[in-house]
Amino acid sequence: MAAFETPRATVCLTFDFDAVSIWIGPYGATSPSAISRGEFGAVGVERILRLLEGAGIAATFFIPGHTVETYPDHARAIVAAGHEVGHHGYLHENPVALEPAQERAVLERGLTAIDRVLGLRPIGYRSPAWDNSPHTIDLLREFGFRYESSQMGDDFTPYWCRVGDVIEGDGPYRFGERVDLVEMPVSWVLDDFPHFEYVSLPPRGLRLPGLSAASKVEEIWRDEFDFMYRDVPGGVMTITMHPQVIGRGHRLLMLERLIAHMRDRDGVVFSRLGDAAERFRQSSPRPV
Ligand SMILES: [Zn+2]
């Protein structure tokens, strides 16, 4: 296969290694019990690395700077195994809640942590809240990112990010200019966290019932894949998982079954998200 030939179907397994950052950052937890839920992410990473090695799959891990500094050995093991590391904030901050100067500082702090511990510069970014501020796309371009993965304007087809959209309440929405940053779209149905994680934080207005049977999620994810395979040739399926969520035994068994199901089809490639973004760049030049 030529370097940038588009496969019949591409699957990108992505893991957001939030660890304790999501609990002490956006969730404001101080109790050892709540924080320990994030600690389990390190256990999950060890299991996921074994699963990926056994399957011969290269994946993408989005890691907050705080996690890189808290679990440097885990972060190094991820890189050593050939997986991609992407930027995921410092303490899992929602960019929309930040002033522009703060958002810039968080981006720089995450890059510094990744550089100091791992000696690399990520090309991909995922907003910790899947929520971009009006400045995020310009900032990512300024810092040399090649793609981001936080928006939902398509499902299985990457596209070019925009800046300068105009929100009109009494007329049609006006789309801005397409810029040199690839969107690798995500979806809540393809995210393990809301399906599985039980969270009750009334002071923060957050309640996720979670605790779904893995078989239900398996059905949704398998049908999403089957639809893409049939109706969207060349599609890219990006699944978002969290080591502290998918790392439970029954969920990992589900992931193994899902991978086997996908591998039963011809022309299915498992790819790091950055590699899939580069293939999109080659096959779909940005309209100017
Ligand atoms: Zn996250």
Image (tube, helix red, strand yellow):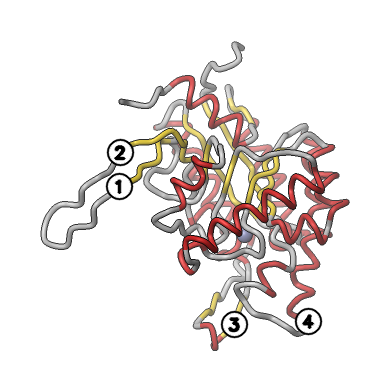
Q: Image point 30% across, 47% down: which residue? A: 164
The x and y percentages for residue 104 are: 55, 56
The foreground one among 75 and 42 is 75
Which comes sooner in the sequence, label 1 or label 3?
1
- Disc 2 versus disc 3: nearer the observer: 2
Q: Is mark 4 within 8 Å of ligand 1?
A: no
- The x, y position of residue 137, in whole percent, is 44, 47
CA–CA distance between discs 2 and 3?
40 Å
The mark found on residue 177 in the picture is 2
Which residue occupies the extreme front position in the image?
101
Measure the alpha-carbon separation of dots 4 and 3. 13 Å
Pointer 3: what residue?
A: 200
The mark found on residue 164 in the picture is 1
Q: Amino acid at mark 2?
A: Glu
Q: Nearer the viewer, residue 7 or 35?
A: 35
Q: Earlier in the sequence, mark 2 or mark 3?
A: 2
Tag 2 or tag 1, which sits nearer the N-term?
1
- Residue type highlighted by circle 3: Ser
